[in-house]
Image (tube, rainbow, N blue to C red):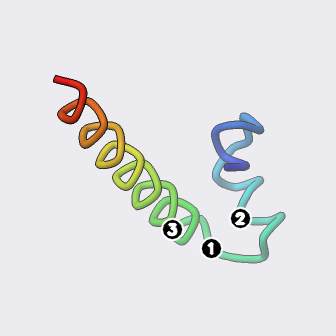
Amino acid sequence: MLRFLGDLSEVTVADALGCSVSTVKTHAARGLAALRSVLDTEEEAQA
């Protein structure tokens, strides 16, 4: 959320959360994949 809604860099988010940049990247990718899955499911249900 911080990465996209807060328009923060991966480095800034990692510093704020006390984790590595790779962890931020991993969680962002997993979150986006989950969101895509939900949106695809909703789109198919409406078709």
Q: Name the residue tied to disc 1.
A: 20
Q: What's the residue at 79%, 65% (across, down)?
A: 15
Q: Is residue 47 left or right of residue 4?
A: left
Q: Is residue 33 left or right of residue 15?
A: left
Quarter of the image for residue 30 reads bottom left
Picture disc at residue 14: 2
What amino acid is labelled 1 in the image? Ser
Please say if 36 is above or below 22.
Answer: above
Picture disc at residue 22: 3
Farthest right residue?
16
What amino acid is labelled 3 in the image? Ser
Give whichever of discs 2 and 3 has the lower sequence position.
Answer: 2
- CA distance separating discs 3 and 1: 5 Å
Instruction: State yes or no: discs 3 and 1 in contact (Cβ < 8 Å).
Output: yes
Give whichever of discs 1 and 2 has the lower sequence position.
Answer: 2
Element marked by disc 1: loop
Quarter of the image for residue 45 reads top left
Element marked by disc 3: helix
Instruction: State yes or no: discs 2 and 3 in contact (Cβ < 8 Å).
Output: no
Q: How many marks?
A: 3
- CA distance separating discs 2 and 3: 9 Å
Please say if 41 is above or below 27.
Answer: above
What amino acid is labelled 2 in the image? Ala
Instruction: State yes or no: discs 1 and 2 in contact (Cβ < 8 Å).
Output: yes
Q: What's the residue at 46%, 56% (across, down)?
A: 31
Q: Position of residue 17 (x, y in %)?
A: 78, 70
Q: Position of residue 5 (x, y in %)?
A: 71, 37
Position of the C terminus, as image quadrant, is top left
Q: Position of residue 7 (x, y in %)?
A: 72, 34
